[in-house]
Image (cartoon, rainbow, N blue to C red):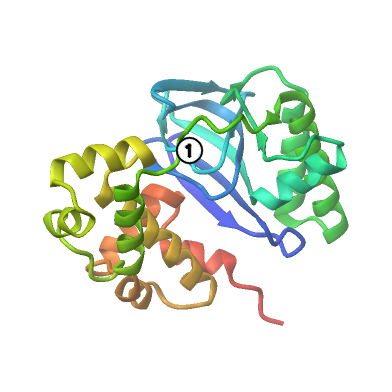
């Protein structure tokens, strides 16, 4: 596995599920989260990632299941890197499948992030392959079958609230970062605006979100950049609209979070011309 390749796309029959097939050797994902779930099948090598305060290792054949909004990284866990197929289903998609299975009301939750020797791995592989070029019926049917298998074997309902609501200062700082994505305040200005001290805000923000304010802002920018690229905007224009210094700055952060450069992401996501 000497060459890195990555393809990120969406099948027309799966509008709320992103797909990634990649082989990475030196690439490292920065600390980030996803709005929806992550279901990844390791096809070769080993992926390592930081998650919930520990370092996990996923070898060939293992499934990785990550819940929404959980901060994690990703990098080679062996000298040869790793290759994998990833499904990124939206929360509503997974919740709908869980409801069909008769699950109690609530958001499905995966308590284990690395699962080895599971029959669900074959289902995920089949669904992902159908998403590469299968017809609409095959792609949608196999996806729901795969998610049902993963849910049956490995999911629980979301744990009861453990008092993790955002502190007022963090919530206010987060709202400011969203509103001023293109022209953000300095840390000192942000802390003053929410009534606290700079270092105290960094600690509170990291404890509540898993990321310091500057890293959280970059993630917000990348998420917005994805929406603009999905509309067909060019990366240079997207960089200007999302607060990145230039296209190279956008590319660096985009690939660290999404896994592919913005230009490749845009080309793969645009519908084919008729």
Q: Residue 215 at what x, y percent from top left?
A: 29, 49
Which image quarter is the C terminus in? bottom right
Q: Which percent across, then down, holds residue 210? A: 36, 38
Q: Position of residue 188 (x, y in %)?
A: 12, 55
Query: With respect to residue 229, does 253 lie above or below?
Result: above
Q: Residue at x 71, y 40 (%)?
A: 106
Instruction: Identify which residue, 221 or 172, lies in the foreground.
Output: 172
Q: Secondary structure at mark 1?
A: loop
The mark total stands at 1
Q: From this viewpoint, which residue is outermost toward the bottom?
A: 274
Residue 86 locus on image (x, y percent): 60, 42
Residue 98 as seen in the image, left or right of residue 243: right
Instruction: Provide the residue designation for mark 1.
Output: 70
Note whether residue 28 is visible: no
Name the residue nearer the viewer: 208 or 135. 208
Q: Compared with residue 213, is residue 274 higher up or lower down, i.e. above or below?
A: below
Give the residue drawn at x 42%, y 24%.
Answer: 77
Q: Residue 219: in sight, yes or no?
A: yes
Closer to the camera in the image, 24 or 51: 51
Residue at figure coordinates x 78%, y 23% from the top left: 119
Tell whether 68 sits left or right of 157: left
Say which quarter of the image contains residue 203: top left
Q: Is residue 172 left or right of residue 269?
A: left
């Amino acid at each position: 596995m000497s060459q890195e390749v990555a393809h990120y796309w969406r099948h027309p029959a799966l509008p709320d599920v992103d797909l990634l097939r990649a082989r990475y050797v030196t690439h490292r994902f920065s600390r980030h989260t996803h709005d929806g779930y992550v279901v990844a099948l390791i096809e070769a090598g080993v992926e390592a990632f930081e998650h919930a305060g520990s370092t996990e290792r996923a070898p060939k054949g293992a499934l990785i299941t990550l819940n929404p909004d959980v901060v994690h990284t990703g990098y080679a866990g062996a000298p040869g890197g790793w290759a994998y197929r990833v499904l990124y289903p939206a929360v509503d998609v997974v919740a709908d499948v869980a409801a069909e299975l008769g699950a109690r009301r609530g958001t499905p939750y995966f308590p284990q992030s690395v699962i080895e020797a599971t029959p669900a791995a074959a289902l995920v592989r089949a669904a992902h392959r159908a998403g590469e070029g299968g017809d609409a019926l095959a792609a949608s049917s196999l996806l729901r079958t795969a998610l049902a298998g993963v849910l049956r074997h490995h999911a629980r309902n979301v744990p009861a609230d453990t008092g993790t609501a955002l502190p007022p200062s963090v919530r206010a700082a987060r709202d400011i970062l969203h509103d001023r994505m293109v022209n953000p305040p300095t840390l000192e200005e942000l802390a003053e605006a929410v009534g606290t001290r700079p270092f105290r805000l960094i600690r509170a923000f990291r404890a509540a979100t898993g990321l310091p304010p500057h890293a959280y802002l970059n993630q917000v920018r990348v998420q917005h950049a994805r929406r603009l690229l999905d509309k067909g905007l060019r990366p240079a224009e997207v960089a200007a609209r999302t607060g990145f210094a230039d296209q190279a700055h956008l590319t660096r952060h985009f690939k660290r979070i999404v896994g592919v450069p913005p230009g490749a992401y845009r080309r793969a996501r645009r519908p084919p011309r008729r």
